[in-house]
Image: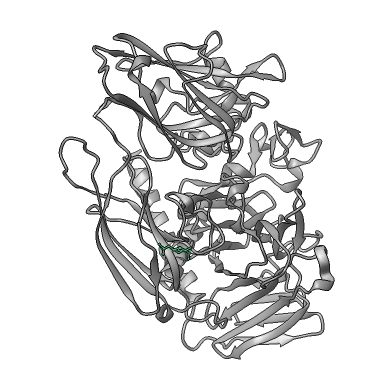
Amino acid sequence: MALARTASHGIIFVAILTNFACSDDLRPAAGAAGVTVHVGLEYVVLDNGIVQLTLSKPEGSITGVKYHGVDNVMEVKEEDGGGYWDIVWNPSNRDSGIFDIILGTEFDVVQQDANQVEVSFRTQWNPSHGGKLVPLNIDKRFVMLRGSSGFYTYAIYEHLQGWPEFNLGETRVAFKLRKDRFHYMAIADNRQRIMPMPEDREAGRSQKLGYSEAVRLTNPINAALRGEVDDKYQYSSENKDSLVHGWISSDPSVGFWVITPSNEFKSGGPVKQDLTSHVGPTCLATFVSSHYAGDDILPRIRNGEYWKKVFGPVFIYLNSASTKSDLKLLWEDAKKQARVEEGSWPYKFPASKDFQKSEQRGSVSGRLLVVDETANKDYVNGNAAFVGLASPGEAGSWQKESKGYQFWVRADAKGMFFIQNVRTGVYKLYAWVPGFIGDYKSSVNITITSRNHINLGNLVYRPPRDGPTLWEIGIPDRSAAEFFVPDPYPYYINRLYVNHPDRFRQYGLWERYTDLYPDHDLMYTVGISDYKKDWFYAHVTRKHGQASYQASTWQIKFRLNSVHRKGTYKLRLALASAVLSELQVRFNNPTAQPADFTTGLIGRDNSIARHGIHGLYWLFSIDVDSSWLLEGDNVIFLTQTRSETPFQGVMYDYIRLEAPA
Ligand SMILES: *[C@@H]1O[C@H](CO)[C@@H](O)[C@H](O)[C@H]1NC(C)=O
């Protein structure tokens, strides 16, 4: 046994060397063929001898990507096939979104030499378009470099002063790949699998589940997938983890990857989640969306304001191996390329002056310290803090911010941070520190100018705290992942997430609450219960009969040996998500009217149905009158009152009771 294992490792090792040698051959640098552009009547073709990209003219949609002997890796038979920029928008007086594929009406070659070709497809709004076209000038760019195994795309959106108001609901680039070739999808080291075919989602091959995006495969073309759930939201990622994702064809061995080298142009900061790749085979680069956040995050262009934003560039990378081999080799190579792209940011090549180059940008550094003690004033390091620059606003406003640019880094173990390559403009510095509640915000605006470095020195974050901790539940990290995530129903499995750290990505977990607590709601006893086992990951509704749902009330039981009658206690209630919920809090009297505290109706992040383990972060600090507390046994009743659907509820991040100072 041991011998056989050693021998097979030997073979794999040889295969790795062969394939990396091969993919390096495909990315020659100097001496490679120059880039050419051929402008036809209805098409424009960019070619560097490695990849040939065909775009419709003047619309600027991708109709062909020829690579490694495959005439076209794109699926172009369908109406929405190929690759395209799209937008969902609505005039401010209209609720429902209008979906448009962005079609250029003017075409230009912006730059053309042997090293680089850049082309532009533009659409210009004018008053004669009225409300039929989104009031934006949009300039879509495609760039091909010499010796590069792929192409770049970016776009500049501009709303001129005085133009009509509108809301931007979504914008992205979508790629539809050939379904006869691309069957294996990879979005992370431990998130990759053979995927269903698009037909598998149709009637006759699948059963619709609780919402249209989720189906159970009853008769898939690949019989091995029978009985599994497919839902594109099971493949969402946080911005910070979405550097590269894509698809692999094994015959011929070709990978197609979307690489997002920076998140500066994305909305909502580093932990905003979005779709990546999914059945189609589809590959997305999403720039604006309400996913896992709700409409509060969407750009609202008002009062004729001037607005301009550059989305991208993103890199579309193609790679290949000479033999039908381990799919992971192409994934490893794509990750390597993704790090190269990330290291080249900000790119030097974009011809648009709206994309600021490195020498036009500025930087900020400093050190974040935390004081979370009431008794002593010791500083602790802001270890691994998330530190970022975003438009001036309230503390935490960055998680709903999408009009401007955001620049985030992780501080080191000492809390030191260095944010490089920041576009010029006015920002505030924001931060949050895993292990501590709340949000840091700089008191002053930070104005970034070209070639200028600002050293902010030591910054001190004082998380909300009035007194010592009496007890706490969970870890303050803006996620519910540390709580109890149940096993999925065997009937609703996605096998990728069996024995996987992301257990929460299974379909139907919300309904397990009713199975696990058939007779009474969750009761947690401080000092005895363990939040990893005894605190359900989401405070959901209780299923009642076939299609009705009930509010549920959770209890936290705790003992106080004595109550300080002078002074106010504090309950810190941090939520990791809220979906059309109202959370009411009562002390020792489950029927008190009104409740001692209510959040009011909050949250539209939809993270329960979308298998996120968090959406937006909420922190409530509740004054607890000492007369509400008893010497001896106490109970806090947490009631989520809204119960129209199975997807309503909140996820807790962390709960703490503080004694008076
Ligand atoms: C910070 O910048 C914002 C936006 O530019 C501005 O509205 C605000 O007045 C500034 N605040 C301070 C304190 O300068």
Q: Quadrant of the C terminus?
A: top left
**Rendering coords of residue 312 (x, y %):** 56, 68
591 and 478: which is toward the camera: 591
Q: Quadrant of the N terminus?
A: top left
Residue at the image point whose x is 69% and y is 40% from the top: 213
4 and 217: which is toward the camera: 217
Q: Is residue 431 above or below residue 58?
A: above
User: Dividing the picture into quarters, in which one does residue 566 lie?
Assistant: top left
304 and 113: which is toward the camera: 304
**Rendering coords of residue 649 (x, y %):** 56, 29
Q: Is residue 326 above or below residue 602?
A: below
**Rendering coords of residue 138 (x, y %):** 68, 72
User: Dividing the picture into quarters, in which one does residue 376 lie?
Assistant: top left
Decide if residue 190 is on the left or right side of residue 491: left
Residue at the image point whose x is 56% and y is 87% from the top: 33
The residue positioned farthest toward the bottom in the image shown: 113
**Rendering coords of residue 207 (x, y %):** 75, 32
Q: Give the number of marks.
A: 0
